[in-house]
Structures are given as C-alpha cells and as structure tokens.
Amino acid sequence: MLAPSGIHHVTAIASDPQRNIDFYAGVLGLRLVKRTVNFDDPTTYHFYFGDEIGRPGSLLTFFPWPNARRGRQGAGQAAVVSFGIVPSSVGFWLERLLKHGIEFEQPVTRFDGERVIALKDPDGLLLELISHQRVDQLEPVVDTGSEALVPAAHGIRGVYSVTLWQDGHQQTAELLTGSLGFKLAREQGSIFRYTSNDGSPGSIVDLRIVPGLWPGVSGAGTVHHVAFRADSIATQSRVRSDLEALGFNVTPPLDRDYFMSVYFREPGGVLFEIATDGPGFSIDEPAEALGRSLMLPPWLEPRRFEIQALLPNIHLPLNLPGPNA
Ligand code: ZN
C-alpha cells in the first residue's frame, strides 16, 4: 500500500487526568490501552483510549494538563471527533448518557441515514456517537470481562470520522485526495466528505466550511492533532517525501514507542501526523494488562521514580456504576 489508509488516532487536550479517565474509560467504556507520559513533556501524562488492543483507527489519545486553559473551537481545527456505534445501540447510549448526567442533543439524521448524538466531554471537546449500518460490519470490541463497563454488543467501534472546520477547502482537499489517499465521497451544503474507502474505523474526514468563523484557540477541550495511518515505515517515508516535495515542512520520523510519527501542518492550520500501524501497544506490556501501569520509553526509565512522584495519582474507574450496576 502506498498511501495512508484512514485515521490512525486523534490526540486532544484535557485538563484533569482523573476526570478524563472517568469519562472515556468509565462513561464511554473505551479501554485505556496505554498509560504513559507525554514524550515532549514527561512530567505530564499521555493517555491512549481505544479498543481492547488499541488498533489503529480506534484511538483517541489525550494530553491531560491539569491546569490547561479551556480552548475554543473554531476555524483551522479538527473540531469534532465522532465514534461509531451500531444502530441497535442508540437507545442504550441515550439511557447511559442520561444516567451519567452527560448533556447531549437528541439524535438527528445526517448523511445516508447516520443517526448522530452530539455531546461534549468534561473539557468541552465536541464529540458525536454516530450509528450507521456499516458500523455493524466492524469487529465488535471484545468484552474484557469484569473490566467492561459497557457490554461488548453496545461498545464503541472506533473513531468513525473527524470534522475539520476551515475557512476554505481547496488546499486541504488536495492534500487529502493527494498524498493522504482519500477520495471525495459527497458534498452536502457546507460539508465535503472524504473517505479512504476501506470502510474501517476512521475512514471518514468531513471538511466543514465555516467562512468568517473565529479562529480556534488551542487548549483543553480541543484537538491537538489528527494522525493518519501508514502500513509500514516505507509507506510513511514515501508520504513524507511526497509532502516535502509539495513544500510542507515535515518533521523527521520520531519514535513514539508504539508507532513512528512524522508531523506537519496542513494548509488549513490543523496539525497532521502520519503514524505507522506498528509495532502497537503490546510491545512493552501484555495485551491483557494494557493501561494498568505507567509505561515509559527506555530513555526515561532511569527517571521513573522522579517522574512518578510528579504525576498525579490516577485510578481506573472500575467502581463507576454503569446502567446495569
Ligand atoms: Zn499523535
């Protein structure tokens, strides 16, 4: 494969780490598949939430900065992160959100019969739960037994799409359909939908044109970057060369332990990353123990004691009551 194949992960900014875990692992029932530090700021956490093994396309990750100021959604941002659920789970999710006191909007119908429940996370990040038949074809999240707070049948099936808010679409569209391997699937009003055509989680990018909207401000409750999948280092390096030839300022490949990454800013202002599918999250701890302990890259291991002392204590929301509790 020569081009990326959809979204690898989305990374956003949060404030309180425990509140972040309680919401994503507790209320939404995602699995915390890695508890590590921000490699660029090792005194703060980096949390990865995803399916049971953290497959590319299932991942939403956070930098929880306890004193982060609230950001503001606006132009030049990936403003909305949408998760896929199966159509038969809509009632379950409405009830669950109600039960946990999470504000949401009543479901509306969008493209091709998608039913969309809009909500916000505790920092104000705009989220959607989108039900659509094609989500049924995706692998169900495997029940992790006593850890599962959401029954597998109703579990979130990965990142369905992201929505970029932009002043104009031409240059970003060229990038998506050029180096990033997407195709224009449809246009509706101010929304241009691009798909990577394989139907897997994360195969949709919606570009929403918001002329005249204020620019987004980075901070808690906003997306930091969107990463696209490369199936190998060779693909990543090819895409990187493509991007450089087009005049983008691309970082050298950076070792993120669980994948290799390169970053660049797309013409509309959103930070993009190309991340390799491998080696994945079980490289440093067994699949059944993912997310239970703090994992550090080898170069930070010598500072483990100091780092642990600086990080806030957190715990998994094992005792958070679910609807069936
Ligand atoms: Zn990333």
Image (spheres, helix red, strand yellow):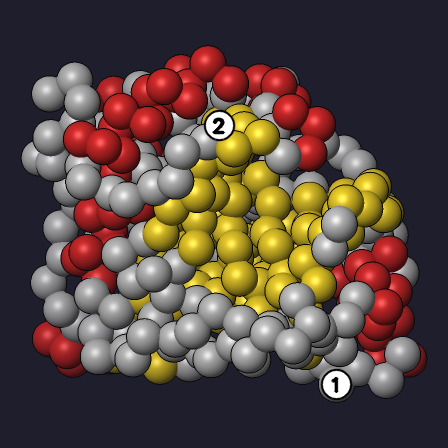
Give the label on residue 124, or none: none
Residue sitting nearer the eye, 140 or 119: 119
- Label 1 CB, ligand 1: below 8 Å? no
Residue drawn where x is 57% and y is 63% of the image: 78
Task: Give the spatial CA distance, label 2 vs label 1.
Answer: 37 Å
Q: Is residue 101 visible?
A: yes
- The kind of residue tagged 2 is Ile
Q: Is residue 119 left or right of residue 196?
A: left
Is 304 left, or right, of 246 in this rendering? left
Residues 105 and 180: in front is 105
Q: In which quadrant of the rendered view does residue 14 lie?
A: bottom left
The residue tagged 2 is 85
**Quadrant in the picture for the C terminus:** top left
The image quadrant that residue 263 belongs to is bottom right
Dots 2, 1 in contact, CB < 8 A? no
Image x and y of residue 55, in percent: 53, 40
**Quarter occupied by residue 230:** bottom right
In the visual, does 127 lie left or right of 229?
left
Using a 10 Å C-alpha cutoff, classify the residue at mark 2 as few (fewer than 14 neighbours), some (14 to 19) or many (20 or more): many
**Kind of residue at badge 1:** Asn
Q: Position of residue 47 (x, y in %)?
A: 34, 58
Instruction: Indicate the secondary structure of the residue bearing disc 2.
Output: strand
Query: Secondary structure under badge 1?
Result: loop
- The first of marks 2 and 1 along the sequence is 2
Placement of 309 over or under 53, stated as above or below: below
What numbered label is drawn on residue 249?
1
Q: Is 74 or 315 nearer to us in this picture? A: 74
Note whether 300 is above or below 97 in the view shown: below
Task: Give percent across and percent down for residue 122.
Answer: 26, 56
CA neighbours of label 1 inside 10 A, class few (<14), some (14 to 19), many (20+):
some
